[in-house]
Amino acid sequence: MKKLVLNHKSYLSYEETIKYIDELKKIKIKNIELVTFPSIPYIALYKGIKNIGAQNFYSYNYGSYTGEINLESLKSMNINYTLIGHSERKKYKLDNYEQIKDKLFKSINAGFETILCVGELDYMKKPIKYIYKELNYLIKSINYDKLNKLKIAYEPSWAIGSGETPAIEEIENIITNIKKYFEKKYEIQIEVYYGGSVDNTNINEILKISDGVLIGKKSANIEELKKIVNQISQNN
């Protein structure tokens, strides 16, 4: 089933989150699974809603990690997804590749459905070469038998929040090549999503050539989300 991955980043207040959850519960969409990544302070408010993820975490275990989030705590709240390597965390120097690699290892080994973001920082003609380098570095520490927990989100940094996306043929080519990478190297089939300026005008076109989409700012606006869902429903 295709995924609609909602990354709220740090947009909503407490009151806005309460209202958002009430409206989110009313949304029904066939053949699409919603996965929601709330702002970390409000993640417990989503208890009882299916497929909730953490935008960030630090360690496996409970411990003396002041101000940090651990996977044991997330698991105790039935959080089942993590998001790793988002370009904004790279951009603001919150995560480097060594930290991303460590988080990827921890998340997959703890049994979380793990979405790894990959993609070029600036526009380039052949981004797949850049992506192969990322994957070669990040994946090599993962046990092959646990790669079924991994999902990939292709998000060119230059497209995020810009209102611009690569041509649909380019997105399809990247997604196809990422899938071939895992089929050839690890003999597995993997879900690959697209993220970067997804909205109600391009959602259906992108869903046709991907396993899902990763939506940022617009997903934190419940009215924008409804527009996207309505557009999908009309073509379902």
Image (cartoon, rainbow, N blue to C red):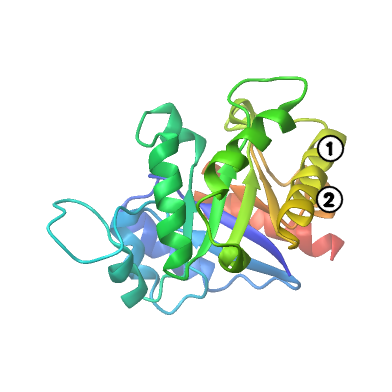
Gap in angstroms between the C-alphas marked 1 and 2: 8 Å
Discs 1, 2 touching: Cβ within 8 Å: yes
In percent of width and height, residue 230 lies at: 73, 60
**Is residue 119 among the parts visible in the rendering?**
yes
The residue carrying pointer 1 sits among few (fewer than 14), some (14 to 19) or many (20 or more) residues within 10 Å by Cα, namely: some
Q: Residue at x 62, y 33 (%)?
A: 133
Classify residue 169 by image quadrant: top right
Sequence-first disc among 1 and 2:
1
Mark 1 element type = helix
**Residue displayed at 61% across by 49% down:** 214
* Residue 209 marker: 2
Residue 203 to residue 127: above or below = below
Question: From where the camera sits, is residue 165 visible?
Answer: no
Q: The C terminus lies in which quarter of the figure? A: bottom right
Label 2: element kind: loop
Residue 122 falls left or right of residue 101:
right
Q: How many marks?
A: 2
Percent position (x, y) of residue 117?
57, 44
The residue under the point 35% across, 63% down is 43
Horizontal arrangement in the rendering, residue 42 relative to residue 49 (left or right): left
Can you identify the residue that label 1 sits on? Answer: 168
Judging depth in this view, the residue of 234 and 192 nearest the camera is 192
Q: Residues within 10 Å of mark 2 (few under 14, many from 20)?
A: some
Q: Which mark is residue 150?
A: none
Quadrant holding the N terminus: bottom right
> Mark 1: which amino acid?
Ile
Residue type, numbered disc 2:
Ile
